[in-house]
Image (spheres, grey):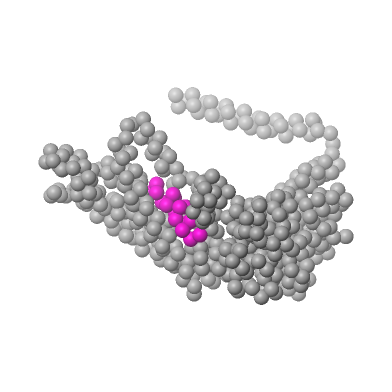
């Protein structure tokens, strides 16, 4: 029994080896000669771009078939930490200047003096708006940011201090003078999508997310930030990383993101394209 | 240092251990008596939360208790409160994940119970309830206590399901585990590490207690215990 089993295993091993060798030997003969080599490009993108960049990923397959995009969506703070810790990344798109500044050696806000992105490739590509969203049907009757510091709201979901939309929300409420008063009502999420889900699931009375997330999740944005409360422009910068082994391909994709086809996709969900 | 996460974690674990104690023991007792056909199935179902990832457990709990879901919406309509995003929502998640530990340990203890004691008591005319509380429970006491302590430790260390169902509101729903995560996320490493030490200290004490009880349990079986 044991002898038969080991014989079968050996044959199976040879079969797999043959198949493995066979396919690589056969492949060049089967495929027509292509100019570009296959490239795997890793893109770290802010969670708020999930729907749009996923669509663009499909489009890019036709524009540059040799490029396989691997996209990691999460809060810009998490992505920045991952890049700091040495994660493989070719292109980083952040939802705020703060996270990009922390990696840009030419930035005066870079306290740790990290040099992890190529400053010459840094471009602002999109603008977004920060809005107040409510669950379907607006059961709490909330219509403005000012309502949050009233009894209409018992719980609001915000991004935590590491998430750009959480930082924007904190700025808004600090400028409105209500940040400390709201502390007992806030539940902090790890990225904007978690906040959006909590609002959609009616687990909270309202939440502060981007206009684009509200659109993608089918939530009603009942109010924009009150005038003068959000002084930091909500701008999304993108840059190629220093450690990228495919800087040209990354730049090509970054250029593609600024093309008309992609601009249409971004504008559809509520982004403003920076020219 | 704001000690709320410790107090919150302790009260959540205490409540869920209390619930798991009674649920686990009843489940172990009645399932031991169940017919073989469904015994295996029930055993698997009740042990499932032990092997499922906590995020899966959290997701399933949200499907049940979320304000938009059948049960959660009903509770909201009839009683007017949400079952999620409160400190006691975490009791659901901790009870569910700690239950299999109590259940399995108690079943083990019950299965090592010397049935001749029960038969002797029955011939003497004792009721089943009296036999359970006065004979079976004291006999299996060390095993049950070990199970209780393990459940408490598991409830204290629960993160995934708790963060999904209770969210994170410092001062209201924060537990030690969710606090450490959020402190790490916001680069507050010093405070995060302090909480790590607090949690390790508690877990250490708890597990030492379990070890001592298990040792006593092993030597116990060899003694003859008078009724």
Q: Position of residue B192 (x, y in %)?
A: 53, 68
Mostly what secondary structure, the magenta segment?
helix
Residue located at (43% from left, 60% from top): B12
- B112 over B214 or under it: above or below: above
The foreground one among A146 and A2 is: A146
- A192 over B38 or under it: above or below: below
Res A80 quadrant in image = bottom right
Side of A24 where B75 appears, left or right: left
Q: Position of residue A133 (x, y in %)?
A: 68, 58
State yes or no: residue B103 in magenta: no
Res A102 quadrant in image = bottom right
Q: Position of residue A248 (x, y in %)?
A: 82, 53
Residue located at (51% from left, 63% from top): B173
Residue A241 seen in the figure: no
First to last magenta residue range: B86-101
The foreground one among B124 and B197 is: B124
């Amino acid at each position: 029994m044991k002898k038969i089993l080991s014989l079968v295993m050996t044959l199976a091993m040879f079969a797999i080896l043959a198949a493995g060798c066979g396919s690589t030997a056969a492949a060049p003969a089967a495929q027509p000669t292509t100019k570009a080599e296959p490239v795997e490009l890793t893109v770290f993108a802010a969670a708020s771009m999930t729907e749009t960049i996923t669509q663009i990923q499909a489009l890019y397959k036709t524009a540059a078939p040799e490029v396989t995009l691997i996209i990691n969506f999460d809060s810009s703070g998490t992505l920045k930490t991952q890049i700091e810790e040495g994660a493989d990344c070719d292109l980083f798109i952040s939802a705020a200047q703060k996270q990009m500044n922390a990696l840009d050696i030419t930035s005066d806000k870079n306290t740790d003096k990290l040099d992890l992105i190529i400053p010459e490739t840094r471009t602002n590509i999109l603008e977004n708006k920060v809005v107040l969203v409510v669950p379907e049907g607006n059961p709490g009757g909330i219509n403005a940011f000012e309502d949050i510091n009233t009894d209409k709201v018992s719980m609001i979901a915000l991004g935590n201090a590491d998430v750009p939309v959480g930082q924007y929300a904190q700025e808004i409420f600090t400028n409105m003078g209500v940040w400390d008063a709201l502390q007992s009502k806030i539940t902090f999420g790890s990225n904007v999508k978690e906040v959006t889900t909590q609002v959609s699931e009616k687990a909270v009375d309202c939440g502060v997310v981007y206009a684009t997330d509200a659109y993608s999740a089918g939530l009603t944005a009942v109010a924009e930030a009150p005038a003068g409360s959000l002084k930091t422009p909500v701008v999304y910068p993108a840059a190629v990383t220093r450690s990228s082994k495919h800087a040209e391909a990354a730049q090509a994709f970054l250029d593609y993101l600024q093309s008309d086809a992609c601009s249409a996709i971004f504008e559809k969900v509520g982004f403003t394209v920076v020219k | 240092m704001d000690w709320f996460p410790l107090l919150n974690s302790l009260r959540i674990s205490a409540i869920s251990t209390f619930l798991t104690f009674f649920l686990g023991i009843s489940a172990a007792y009645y399932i031991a008596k169940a017919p073989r056909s469904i015994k295996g199935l029930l055993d698997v179902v009740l042990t499932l939360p032990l092997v499922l990832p906590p995020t899966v457990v959290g997701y399933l709990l949200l499907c049940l208790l979320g304000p938009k879901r059948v049960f959660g919406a009903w509770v909201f309509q009839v009683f007017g409160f949400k079952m999620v995003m409160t400190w006691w929502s975490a009791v659901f998640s901790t009870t569910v994940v700690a239950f299999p530990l109590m259940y399995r340990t108690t079943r083990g203890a019950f299965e090592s119970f010397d049935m001749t004691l029960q038969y002797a008591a029955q011939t003497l005319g004792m009721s089943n309830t009296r036999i359970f509380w006065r004979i079976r429970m004291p006999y299996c006491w060390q095993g049950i206590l070990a199970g209780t302590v393990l459940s408490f430790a598991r409830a204290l260390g629960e993160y995934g399901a708790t963060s999904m169902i209770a969210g994170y509101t410092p001062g209201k729903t924060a537990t030690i585990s969710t606090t450490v995560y959020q402190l790490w996320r916001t680069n507050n490493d010093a405070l995060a590490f302090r909480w790590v030490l607090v949690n390790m200290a508690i877990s250490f004490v708890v597990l030492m207690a379990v070890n001592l009880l298990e040792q006593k349990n092993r030597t116990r079986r060899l003694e003859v215990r008078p009724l």
